[in-house]
Amino acid sequence: SAVISQKPSRDICQRGTSLTIQCQVDSQVTMMFWYRQQPGQSLTLIATANQGSEATYESGFVIDKFPISRPNLTFSTLTVSNMSPEDSSIYLCSVTTEGGMNTEAFFGQGTRLTVV
Amino acid sequence: LAKTTQPISMDSYEGQEVNITCSHNNIATNDYITWYQQFPSQGPRFIIQGYKTKVTNEVASLFIPADRKSSTLSLPRVSLSDTAVYYCLVGDIPGGGNKLTFGTGTQLKVEL
């Protein structure tokens, strides 16, 4: 299993500013994943963060807008840059681990971002 | 990754059994079926995972027919606290590193 701590849990930000979200895992993991969940919608993968290399971004997401750091095997940050109201969403980090017969994904509580 | 189709919403009453069916017609040989539950203001939580036939744990059962083109999550005797969104995911699972593709999910509402 894995316990994920995400900070901040919520924030209200002015448009044009940036917010950095932190994700701390209680065990070492190879890959960490960042998702976005817009109001009333499902989760969409933003990028996969590997330690020691650049993050891999999904279609529609770019590094300039969502820079990611992965300095070690238990920590990652996602920055939402030059924010606009359309960036108002919940941002979640996730890791997957093998637990017995299953491979499970574990998620942080999420960061609820409101851009005004 | 195989696409999944599930009902947008379902309603039930406390004490009833709830069955949520997911269609995944183009499931691949190596794909597993996994269900997650998400409460408001929380990240999704793993419920159950299977490859074929039937899997049961302390929370739910997962029924998978022989052709594996669909699966049914069964929640016995639901309570108000089971009100949540349930996601069906299908994909290959390499060791400890798969990324997940979430569909629309099913909003289950349980009432008294």
Image (cartoon, rainbow, N blue to C red):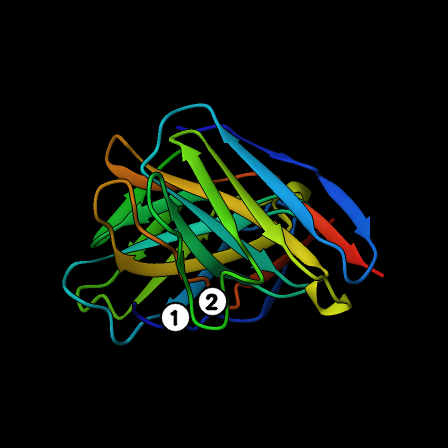
Give the chain letter at badge 2: B
Q: Quadrant of residue A42?
A: bottom right
Direction from residue B44 to residue A116 in the image, left or right: right
Q: Quadrant of residue B47?
A: top left
Q: Secondary structure at mark 1?
A: loop
The amino acid pointed to by label 2 is Gly
Q: Nearer the viewer, residue B1 or B6?
A: B1
Give the chain letter at badge 1: B
Image point 53% across, 53% down: which residue? Answer: A67
Q: Residues within 10 Å of mark 1 (few under 14, many from 20)?
A: many
Q: Does residue B34 show up?
A: yes
Image point 32% across, 61% down: which residue? Answer: B90
Mark 1 / mark 2, whichever is N-terminal: 1
- Quadrant in the picture for the C terminus of chain A: bottom right
Measured as percent of width and height from the top left, residue B74 is found at: 43, 52
Direction from residue A40 to residue A30 in the image, left or right: left
Return the residue at label 2: B103
Q: CA distance from mark 1 to mark 2?
A: 6 Å
